Structures are given as structure tokens and as C-alpha cells.
């Protein structure tokens, strides 16, 4: 069928339009075959395609799925700080969708890691919205470059698993706009995801699926979203209300199309709104036609495994490397003990709806065997939450005692974190820590390799290890990637996308986590993660953006130049001072000066990962747009840039700042109309009101206008006083002054 003959909503009956707004089954869009509208498949896939073997029959099965490349989940990939690499992962995922005839892959998930106990932190990107948006956009753009759609999720404020199907997230407008919506906004504006999946939860009392402000006013009206909005599976509780709010597609079907038909007939749904929602579904299928018409396509299994390999290498964060214990020399003659079941049975992905079947699986032990690297292995513990096995522990301690260096693989078993529940502690299983301490008692050279989807407590046991490599969840190629880094083939280059606190109770969200009586208050506002820790000087174990390398780097020649009224450009030179080729990530933070609202001490607003040969230097340039300096003003109901001086910090983590420059911005000049509830201080600072106040001062003592007090205490009261309260301070003359201010202002603003 050529493009000009594609059907439109005008060709459909009311019943057919209604049918398009609900799925055909759990994994298919509803088609209208008689009108040439196919019912394409859509299925899970934040970090790889999870096409259920039962999907063709429409059944839901979270276990059995067709083989697909398992890339590192976002917990790891986010630490790469490499948008180009993430785009390659997206391209590969799109190609696998073509082979499996999947029109839309359900991901990525860009919800903020509000609290490290969140059960889905493994598939979300960061505590920082700028980083989350500028990384995850690569998945969207990469997949869609192959003619396959994505579903950006979960829109919005799905930041916990506890009571997730109904919890009411009570969030200020400012926190929503600055923390919980920007990743979605950036991706919508730059990559136009074909679909967006709304979340289960309520936001300030309204279910996301029925939230007209969220789905229509903000998403489509403000951001210009052109695609369709679908529900999370079972998140639509009122089809009529949801369709009116801007939800195109209910998933899975509830077999209630008659509700839409009746509502359209009796006027509860505007026919034009139903047409818009149904036409969106037709447009979606039309975009997918070309890719879904490719028959016999087969993706490059080995090529995609290599992309997964590279992604895994860049996902690792080296936290500690005392006495340069890493890298190890595979040919150095030292006896190596590998301890921990994770080395043999890797935990390479998270649990729940994103769990996929890899095309191949290579453990660290597999890789050692393939590369001929000798090591003694002892599992040490079982991958569950059961008590320790004394026999396994004794075997592991003996292996460590007989070796020159012990590589100890620790982490969280799958039972400890998954979609569906939140964690209760940051600690790893006690049996693993006890084993580590026993090993440290017999070995001076211990390096720990961590496997976990969200941060774990490190400080309580860090003194038992000279080296700590945080590998997160590495996907199917984790084995060779670990070997590359541990044996020095490649220098680690990952940076933390999430702060590692010393204690979970240091996290500001803990005061309201995970809520009570069906709601959760986001009382910390915009002070999430490092925005809180850095602003209030709270000690952390490892700061946001942190990560060591086998190389050493220097950042120099930092400059910041104003490029517009409220924009700037930052340049810096980064030099590899070592004899090891490696990568460093230059991070740019904006530090606002004095502000009318409480602002974080600094916020990430730009970054660039730079790969450098030994001794090489490169100069990077990072442009800062007006948004980089703005905060969301609830007074203006808009973004606002205040005039004044801003610090531009360039460094390698939020607490490792190499240099700071400053820029003086003009501000956006926004002001609200003044009235009797505006304070005298607001009148003085307003461009128009200030002229009226100047006239008052000039005419003081005449025409009934008072001479204003000039002592500090009285001026303080005057500054903060709404002008309708001036009689409290000035008596009868206060009434005259209030009337004069309002009359003169009206003349100047006609």
C-alpha cells in the first residue's frame, strides 16, 4: 500500500475508532484489517528485546522470551557518560526488533533515582535529570533510526515500587519541572519518541492516565509531542476520562470499547478528541510499516555482542585502587584466586518485565578459560538470601590464603532487588561481607568486584579491600569486559550517575519514604541526590560523577564566555598525564549566586567524554543555553533566569572541581503585574514600580504622602509589607500612599 492510500480516521466507523484506542491483546496493537490497519506487536525492552515466546498468542509470560542481545541495564550504561555509545546500543536494539517484527520496544525508563532503595533503580538512569535525558535520548534516537518506535516511560513520577499501582505522589510544581520532568522533556523535544508510556501512580491526586495537564497541556501543548501516549499495563482505570485527558492507547485491553462508543454518542467525548486519539494510532502503524515489511532480516549476533561488550567496559566505575592493585598482569606470575559465585554465575540484568534471554552468556570464569589465564576459583557463597555455607567459606579462605591476590566478586542476588518491590537496606547480604573480612585476614591484596543494580553500602567493608570495581549489571558480555578492565587491556572510564551515601538515612527523601496511607510527599523538593548532599555539606562515600582511571588527567585553561543575554560557552583543556590511553569525562556545573528561591549549590549542565592517548591533550567546548541557568518559578509559572553572577564549575565529579569561572547574565527581565498584595520591596525592585516609588520619595511630605522611615528596623518591616498593610506602619498616610502607588502604576501600564 503506497503512502497516499493509507487509511485515515475518516475512513473508520465509530466502533473502529474506539477499537484502536485499546490493544488487540497483551502484546499487539488493535488492527482493522478490513481498512488496511495492521495490529503490530509491541513488547518490553529497556536494555534489550524481551519478546515473550507466548507473545504471538497474546499471553503474558515474563520468563520465556526469544534470544536477544542483553545490553547493560541503565544502572551500568548510565555510568558510561557516553551518548554516542548509547546511540549504538539503540541502533542494535532497533535491528533486533526488525528481525522479530516488533514495531515498538517499551523503553527507555527515565524516572529519577529519588532514593537508592527504589526497586527499579537498575533500569533507570540517574539521580540527575540532565544526565538521564542526555544519555537515554541515545536509545530513542538509535532505535527509531531503524524505523522502529520506542516508548519513553514511565510518565511521570514513578520513583518507587511500594504501592506503585495507586500511590499519590505529592510534588511541587517546581520539583516536577526541575527534577522529574526534564529528562522526558529533553527527549521529546530532541528525538520525538513515537510513544510515551504513562505511569501507574497518581500525581497530586490525579492518575497519570487521566491527567489532562500532564498528557495534553504539558506534553503536547508545551513540548510539542507528536506521538501517542499508552498506558502502563493496567494503569488505565477510566477509559473515557483517560481518552479525554490525551491517552491514545489502553494496554492491555479491558474489552470495554463500548464505553468509548457510548461516551462519543452521548457527548461525554468530543468526536474531534476521539478522532485525534485514533488518528494517532493510525499514524503510529504507518510509521512502522516500512520496517515491519522487511522479511527474512537477521541481525548480526556477534556484532551486537561486541556492542554489548563495549557498553559493559564503559559501564564500570573504579571506586578504589590503593597501591594500584588493579590492573593485574595476567602473565606476571602472581597466583590469582577468584572468589564469589558471581564470577561463575553473573547477575547481568534486573528482575521483572525487562528480563530477557541473551543470545550468548560469557562469565568472567568463561573468559579466563578462553584467554588462558590461570586462576583458582571458589564460589564462597550461594546466590540467595540463605545463611552462609561453612564449607564454601572455608574453601574460599583457603584459596585466598594460597594466592598472591584475591578477586572477590560480591553483590546483590536477584531476590534482593527487582521490579515490584523496594529494597529495605543498602547493605549486601551479611554472609558476603563476613566472607570478605575472613579473606582480608589472610590476604593483603584483595580487590572487590561488585554486581548490583543500585548502590550498596561500601564504607562498612571498604577497609578489607585495596581495590573496588563497581560493575553494576553488565549484560551478556560482562565476562570479557571485566577481564579487559581487570587485566588492563582497557582503562576503566565510568563515572557514577548516582551518589553513594554513607548511610541511607543521609538521603533527604527518607523522611517521606515510601509514604503512608496511599500517598508520598516529595518533601525534599529539588534537593535530590547530590543537589542535597553538596548544598548542605553532607559527607558521602563517593560523590556523583566520581570514577577513577588507570591514567591521570589534568584539566586546565578553563574559560567561560557570555554568548548572549543569558547564554554562555565553556572551554577547557584536558590532558592525559600518564602513559596509559584512557578516557576522562569533563563535567560542567552551574552554580547560581544569590537567588529569590532556594537553589542547589550547583547542578550538572554539560559533559563530554574525551578519549586520549598517552600524553595527548584536547580542548572541549560546552555551550550552556538559557535553561542551564534557569529555575522554575511558581510565581511566574515559567522558567526564570535572574540577573547576576553565575559560577561555572568544571571538574571530574560534583566534588572534584578543577576550576571555576564566572559569567554575569542579564536575566530574562520577567516581572509580574503589581497590586495591593505586592510588597513595598517588590515595588522598589520592579522596573515600572520602581519609577513610582522614586516619585513617592521625591514628593514625600507633600500631597499627603508620608516621609518614609529611614532607620534600619522600620525599613526592614516596610520592605516585606504588602502595600495594603502600609496603614499598619504609617497610619492614615499609609492609605494615601497605597492609593498613590496603585493610581500612578495604572497610568504607566495602560
Image: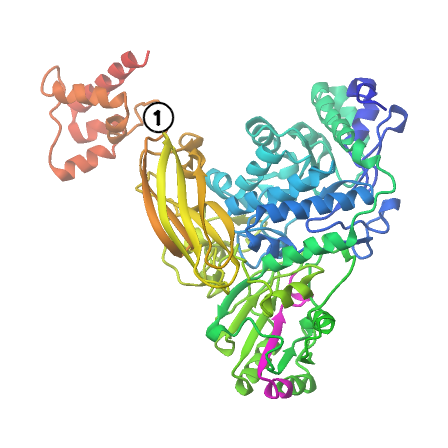
Q: Residue at x 46, y 50 (%)?
A: 586
Q: Is residue 601 left or right of residue 59?
A: left
Instruction: Assess disc 1: are there few (<14), some (14-19) or many (≥20) residues with their C-alpha within 10 Å of its C-alpha.
Output: some
Q: In the rendered view, tell whether residue 169 sits above or below residue 365.
A: above
Q: Nearer the viewer, residue 140 or 491?
A: 491
Give the x, y percent position of residue 607: 48, 47
Specify how the rendered protein is coloured.
rainbow
Residue 521 rendering spot, x and y as whole percentages? 50, 48
Q: Residue at x 38, y 44 (%)?
A: 599
Q: Does residue 383 sit above or below 348 in this rendering?
A: below
Q: Give the residues in magenta.
A: 398-417
Residue 232 shown left or right of residue 552 in the figure:
right
Would residue 381 be visible to someone looking at this image? yes
Residue 749 in the image: state x and y as whole percent: 31, 14
Q: What is the number of callouts on the image?
A: 1
Tag 1's secondary structure? loop
Image-based side of 540 in relation to 227, left or right: left
Answer whether residue 138 is magenta in the image: no
Q: Which residue is mark 1?
A: 671
Q: Residue at x 69, y 22 (%)?
A: 273
Q: Position of residue 671 (x, y in %)?
A: 35, 26
Q: Nearer the viewer, residue 278 or 212?
A: 278
State which quadrant residue 389 falls in: bottom right
Amino acid at each position: 500500500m503506497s503512502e497516499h492510500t493509507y487509511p485515515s480516521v475518516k475512513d473508520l466507523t465509530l466502533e473502529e475508532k474506539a477499537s484502536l484506542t485499546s490493544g488487540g491483546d497483551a502484546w499487539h496493537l488493535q488492527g482493522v484489517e478490513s481498512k488496511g490497519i495492521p495490529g503490530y506487536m509491541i513488547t518490553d525492552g529497556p536494555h534489550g528485546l524481551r519478546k515473550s515466546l507466548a507473545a504471538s498468542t497474546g499471553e503474558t509470560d515474563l520468563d520465556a522470551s526469544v534470544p536477544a542481545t542483553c545490553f547493560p541495564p541503565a544502572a551500568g550504561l548510565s555510568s558510561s557518560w557516553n551518548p554516542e555509545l548509547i546511540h549504538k546500543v539503540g541502533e542494535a536494539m532497533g535491528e533486533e526488533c526488525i528481525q522479530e517484527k516488533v514495531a515498538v520496544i517499551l523503553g527507555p525508563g527515565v524516572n529519577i533515582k529519588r532514593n537508592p532503595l527504589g526497586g527499579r533503580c537498575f533500569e533507570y538512569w540517574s539521580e540527575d535529570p540532565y544526565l538521564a535525558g542526555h544519555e537515554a535520548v541515545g536509545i530513542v534516537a538509535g532505535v527509531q533510526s531503524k524505523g522502529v518506535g520506542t516508548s519513553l516511560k514511565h510518565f511521570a513520577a514513578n520513583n518507587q515500587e511500594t504501592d506503585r499501582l495507586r500511590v499519590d505522589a505529592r510534588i511541587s510544581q517546581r520539583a516536577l519541572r526541575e527534577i522529574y520532568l526534564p529528562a522526558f522533556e529533553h527527549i521529546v523535544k530532541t528525538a520525538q519518541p513515537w510513544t510515551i508510556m504513562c505511569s501507574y501512580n497518581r500525581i497530586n491526586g490525579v492518575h497519570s492516565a487521566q491527567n489532562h495537564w500532564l498528557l495534553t497541556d504539558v506534553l503536547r501543548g508545551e513540548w510539542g509531542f507528536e506521538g501517542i501516549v499508552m498506558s502502563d499495563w493496567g494503569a488505565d482505570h477510566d477509559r473515557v476520562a483517560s481518552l479525554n485527558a490525551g491517552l491514545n492507547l489502553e494496554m492491555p485491553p479491558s474489552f470495554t470499547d463500548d464505553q468509548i462508543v457510548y461516551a462519543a454518542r452521548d457527548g461525554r467525548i468530543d468526536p474531534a478528541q476521539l478522532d485525534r486519539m485514533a488518528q494517532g494510532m493510525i499514524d503510529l502503524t504507518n510509521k512502522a510499516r516500512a520496517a515491519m515489511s522487511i522479511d527474512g532480516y537477521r541481525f548480526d549476533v556477534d556484532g551486537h555482542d561486541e556492542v554489548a561488550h563495549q557498553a559493559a567496559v564503559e559501564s564500570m566505575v573504579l571506586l578504589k585502587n590503593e597501591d594500584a592493585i588493579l590492573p593485574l598482569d595476567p602473565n606476571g606470575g602472581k597466583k590469582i584466586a577468584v572468589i564469589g559465585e558471581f564470577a561463575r554465575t553473573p547477575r547481568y540484568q534486573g528482575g521483572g518485565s525487562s528480563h530477557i534471554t541473551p543470545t550468548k552468556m560469557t562469565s568472567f570464569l568463561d573468559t579466563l578459560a578462553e584467554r588462558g589465564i590461570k586462576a583458582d576459583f571458589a564460589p564462597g557463597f550461594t546466590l540467595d538470601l540463605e545463611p552462609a555455607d561453612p564449607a564454601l567459606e572455608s574453601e574460599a579462605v583457603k584459596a585466598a590464603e594460597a594466592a598472591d591476590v584475591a578477586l572477590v566478586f560480591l553483590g546483590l542476588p536477584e531476590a534482593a532487588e527487582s521490579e515490584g518491590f523496594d529494597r529495605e537496606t543498602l547493605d549486601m547480604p551479611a554472609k558476603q561481607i563476613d566472607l570478605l573480612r575472613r579473606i582480608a585476614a589472610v590476604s593483603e591484596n584483595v580487590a572487590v568486584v561488585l554486581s548490583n543494580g543500585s548502590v550498596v553500602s561500601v564504607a562498612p567493608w571498604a577497609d578489607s579491600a585495596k581495590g573496588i570495581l563497581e560493575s553494576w549489571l553488565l549484560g551478556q558480555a560482562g565476562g570479557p569486559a571485566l577481564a579487559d578492565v581487570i587485566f588492563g587491556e582497557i582503562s576503566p572510564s565510568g563515572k557514577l550517575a548516582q551518589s553513594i551515601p554513607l548511610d541511607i538515612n543521609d538521603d533527604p527523601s527518607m523522611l517521606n519514604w515510601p509514604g503512608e496511607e496511599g500517598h508520598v510527599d516529595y518533601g525534599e523538593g529539588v534537593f535530590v541526590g547530590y543537589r542535597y548532599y553538596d548544598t548542605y555539606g553532607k559527607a558521602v562515600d563517593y560523590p556523583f560523577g566520581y570514577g577513577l582511571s588507570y591514567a591521570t588527567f589534568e584539566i586546565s585553561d578553563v574559560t567561560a564566555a557570555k554568548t548572549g543575554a543569558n547564554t554562555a560557552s565553556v572551554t577547557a583543556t584536558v590532558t592525559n598525564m600518564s602513559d596509559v590511553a584512557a578516557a576522562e569525562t569533563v563535567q560542567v556545573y552551574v552554580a547560581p549566586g544569590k537567588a529569590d528561591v532556594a537553589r542547589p549549590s550547583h547542578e550538572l549542565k554539560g559533559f563530554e567524554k574525551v578519549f586520549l592517548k598517552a600524553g595527548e591533550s584536547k580542548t572541549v567546548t560546552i555551550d550552556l543555553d538559557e535553561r542551564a541557568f534557569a529555575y522554575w518559578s511558581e510565581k511566574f509559572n515559567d522558567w526564570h533566569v535572574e540577573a547576576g553572577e553565575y559560577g561555572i564549575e568544571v571538574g571530574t565529579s560534583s566534588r572534584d572541581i578543577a576550576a571555576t569561572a564566572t559569567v554575569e547574565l542579564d536575566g530574562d527581565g520577567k516581572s509580574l503585574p503589581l497590586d495591593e498584595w505586592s510588597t513595598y520591596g517588590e515595588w522598589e525592585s520592579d522596573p515600572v514600580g520602581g519609577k513610582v516609588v522614586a516619585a513617592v520619595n521625591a514628593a514625600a511630605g507633600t500631597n499627603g504622602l508620608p516621609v518614609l522611615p529611614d532607620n534600619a528596623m522600620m525599613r526592614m518591616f516596610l520592605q516585606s509589607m504588602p502595600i495594603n498593610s502600609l496603614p499598619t506602619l504609617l497610619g492614615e498616610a499609609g492609605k494615601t500612599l497605597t492609593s498613590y502607588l496603585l493610581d500612578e502604576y495604572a497610568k504607566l501600564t495602560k
